[in-house]
Image (tube, rainbow, N blue to C red):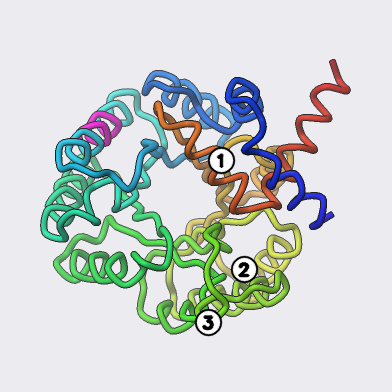
Amino acid sequence: MALLDRAIARVLPAVPKPVVRRLAAPYIAGPSLEDAVSIVRRLNGERKLATVDVLGEEVTSTAAASEIAQAYHRVLARIEGEKLDSNISVKLTGLGLDLDYGFCRANLEALVEDARVRSNFVRIDMEDSTTTEMTLRLYRELYAGGRENLGVVLQARLRRTLVNAVGLANVRLCKGIYIEPASIAFQDPEEIRENFRAALRVLLDQGSYVGIATHDEALIVDALAQVRERGLSPDRYEFQMLLGVRPSRGDALVRDGHRLRVYVPFGTHWYEYSMRRLQENPTIAGYVAADTVRRVVRR
């Protein structure tokens, strides 16, 4: 199956853009904030939480970064106005991290303050390894300054993750989608899984609130066992999944009394997001292909 997933991912650049858009449609809310609001409202009706992501990263101008920051402020206002159960996820390169650290920090701090006033929360997404150190630094600086409505992401693929996990209060733990060299990242899927399990143990043992972000059934089963062993109540952790990926498994988690948060991306940069997700994580490409086949068969 892994070989098939990788084969699917490799041929994606040859797929016409309109076809990619049709394939990606179930996994992206749409180009507008209205699209995202509609999806979040539906998810809330299914007793699921959401985190909204404005697509766009690695901006090349302060004007573009400011535009993304303002889009997030509009998201926070709509979440409050619509009384939706959702927070936001931000990528620091979209807020100007590659341009100027202080400028990025100012954008992020303004968003965290806006979220605090609205009793909401900001998750800093983790990007490739070139941004890891600065991302963790910025999170720690703001959190130490009293910005407690702020969380970060750790990637089990990276060898440094167990060390980085120590002392973090609110973490989304995922495998990580970025292709990294063997010197800093595990390459074998089972090694990545084992590091995920170990990081989850560290985080839960130190009392962190953890967003367990995975579609891997083996890791879901292990996480459920770890939660049971510690006798954790549902407000001490949550599961997280991508929009449109394994929704039936998410439904089962909700029925069993677990919190589930769904990642809801929207915006005009849908093609770049889709290609990165599908190419850098062949397993997701396999999920998408299998789901697409099921849809065609049903029709």
Q: Point out the tag, 1 or 2, that comes first from the N-terminus.
A: 2
CA gap, disc 1 and disc 3: 25 Å
**Residue at the outermost top position:** 299
Q: Label the magenta part by its dominant secondary structure.
A: helix
Residue at x-position 69% and y-position 49% = 256
Q: x, y percentage for residue 132? A: 36, 68
Helix, strand or loop status at disc 1: helix
Q: Which residue is mark 1?
A: 275
The magenta stretch spans which residues? 70-76
Q: Which amino acid type is shown beneath numbered disc 1?
A: Met
Type of amino acid at the residue the image marks with label 2: Val
Q: Residues within 10 Å of mark 2 (few under 14, many from 20)?
A: some
Residue 252 is a magenta residue: no
Disc 3 residue crowd, few under 14, some 14–19, many 20+, Cα 10 Å: few
Residue that carries the numbered disc 2 in the rendered image: 227
Q: Is residue 273 above or below residue 142?
A: above
Q: Which residue is mark 3?
A: 183
Quadrant position of residue 12 = top right
For the image shown, how many numbered marks are present on the structure? 3
Residue 208 percent across, percent down from the top left: 43, 71
Residue 90, placed above or below residue 290 = below
